Amino acid sequence: MTKQTDCGHPKYKRIAANREIAGLVFEYKTEQCTNCGATLWSSETEILFREWLRKQKAEHPDKFTIQDIKIPLDLYEFAVDFGKRHSVTETDVFRSAIAIFYTHQDAEMISNMKLPKFSQDFVTKKLRTNPVMYLRIETDARLLDLYKGEVVSEIIKRVLHLSQKGEEKMLAEMERLLFAA
């Protein structure tokens, strides 16, 4: 039997495969191209993977923690003040900044914007995320050849800088996310 896979080759075989995230291993069955070795990630596999992630979050919440996030002191103080005004912690502000970055229609603009000089003093934090957010950060870290903490630091710097500047769109989005929590 032959079947067309995503790679375009007609022959495949059924294999056991796995995917690692945060030191945890998701095992699944899939098809692999016998010509190039590409594996198929089906919508059924995606559903199983998301269910598995939900269980992992409940069983291993600390596995989805990003370490060594360096935040310039001036932005950290802004996050603390912003959080106090909205009765949330600075950690909630950081999480909302990450959510804005990954869901905002101007994410490319945010990524490419030139940043000013920030305080040379830093606060080092760790941040527990949900598994999907962790996976996105992990993927970006791999693509950019950075540590996960560096990726999160850059995201927080960019989004909080826009919020600190008084960018109404960014402030409104951050407030919307904080009140939804």
Image (cartoon, rainbow, N blue to C red):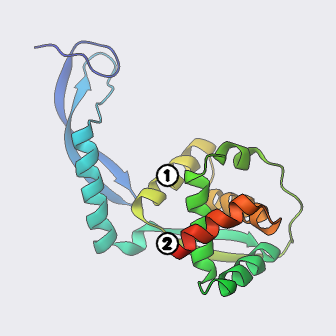
Determine which of the numbered discs, if any, sits on residue 72 in the image.
Answer: none
Which structural element holds mark 1?
A: helix
Q: Quadrant of the N terminus?
A: top left
Residue at the location (75% across, 44% down)?
A: 112
| Badge 1: residue crowd in 10 Å (few <14, some 14–19, many ≥20) | few
Q: Is residue 75 left or right of residue 91?
A: right
Please name which of the two marks, 1 or 2, marks the residue nearer to the observer. 2
Determine which of the numbered discs, if any, sits on residue 136 in the image.
Answer: 1
User: Residue 22: in sight, yes or no?
Assistant: no
- Quarter of the image holding residue 147? bottom right
Disc count in the image? 2
- Quarter of the image holding residue 135? bottom left
Residue at the location (75% across, 62% down)?
A: 168
Mark 1 to mark 2: distance in Å? 21 Å
Determine which of the numbered discs, if any, sits on residue 180 in the image.
Answer: 2
Image position, residue 137 (x, y; %): 53, 55
In this picture, is 90 found above or below 96? below
Image position, residue 63 (x, y; %): 41, 69
